[in-house]
Amino acid sequence: MKNSSRRGFMGKAFGAVAGVGAIASLYAMKKSWDPLPSVKAAGFTTLDMSPYEENQLVTEKWRGKPIFVMKKTAEMLAKQTEEQAARDIKVGDGHYMIAIGLCTHLGCIPAYNADDKGFLCACHGGQFDWSGQVTKVPPPRGFDIPPFKIDGMKLVLGEEGPEYKAMKASGITL
Ligand code: FES
């Protein structure tokens, strides 16, 4: 009787130790499956929006893709249509065209002409205006807008802030 209760205690103690061990090894396995912090951080690109100059296209990078950033001029803002304005990303006092810099036809990288204030895709002649809308086919739609979050004068690419969610809901981002 005494022996069996001792065995029972030993069994429970062993079981408890084995249970803790199993949880610890599951935790270790999960940790090894999770992406490293540096990999998680690599999904985001933070841009300081203060240095960009009006009507000058700068190509940044996010997740290996070119990202077009252009600050609009007062003249552009004064004459742009509602559809063009709907694509504006406002950071501080500036209005920006920010888009994935790949033609929505077959993925070439269009070039910006600051004099014409438009983009030309050399592959098949597609054209886009300064806000990223198509002005000449074959591209089926305007430039795609990457997920973004506005944080003061910074823009975090890869995070979905409320402004991006609103654009996405109205179908502007794709
Ligand atoms: S890839 Fe740009 S027009 Fe075809």
Image (spheres, rainbow, N blue to C red):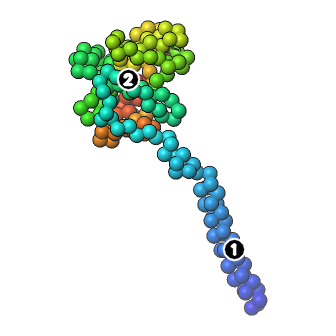
In the depicted structure, whether residue 23 falls above or below residue 118: below
Quadrant for the N terminus in the image: bottom right
- Left or right: 73, with 158 as reference point: left
Residue 142: tell me if it is visible.
Answer: yes
Report how far apart the C-alphas of labels 2 and 1 lie in the structure: 65 Å
In the depicted structure, whether residue 39 falls above or below residue 77: below
Residue at screen point 53% across, 33% down: 64
In the depicted structure, whether residue 87 falls above or below residue 129: below
Provide the secondary structure element on which disc 2 rests: loop
Provide the secondary structure element on which disc 1 rests: helix
Which amino acid, by three-letter code, is at mark 2? Leu
Q: Where is residue 59 in the image (x, y as percent from the top left)?
A: 43, 27
How many residues crowd around disc 2 within 10 Å: few (fewer than 14), some, or many (20 or more)? Answer: many
Q: Position of residue 88 (x, y in %)?
A: 32, 25
How many numbered badges does the structure rendering display?
2
Q: Nearer the viewer, residue 5 or 10?
A: 10
Mark identifier at residue 57: 2
Q: Where is residue 173 in the image (x, y as percent from the top left)?
A: 42, 26
Residue 104: tell me if it is visible.
Answer: no
- Left or right: 38, with 22 as reference point: left
Residue topped by disc 1: 15
Which amino acid, by three-letter code, is at mark 1? Gly
Mark identifier at residue 132: none
Residue at screen point 63% across, 70% down: 20
How many residues crowd around disc 1 within 10 Å: few (fewer than 14), some, or many (20 or more)? Answer: few
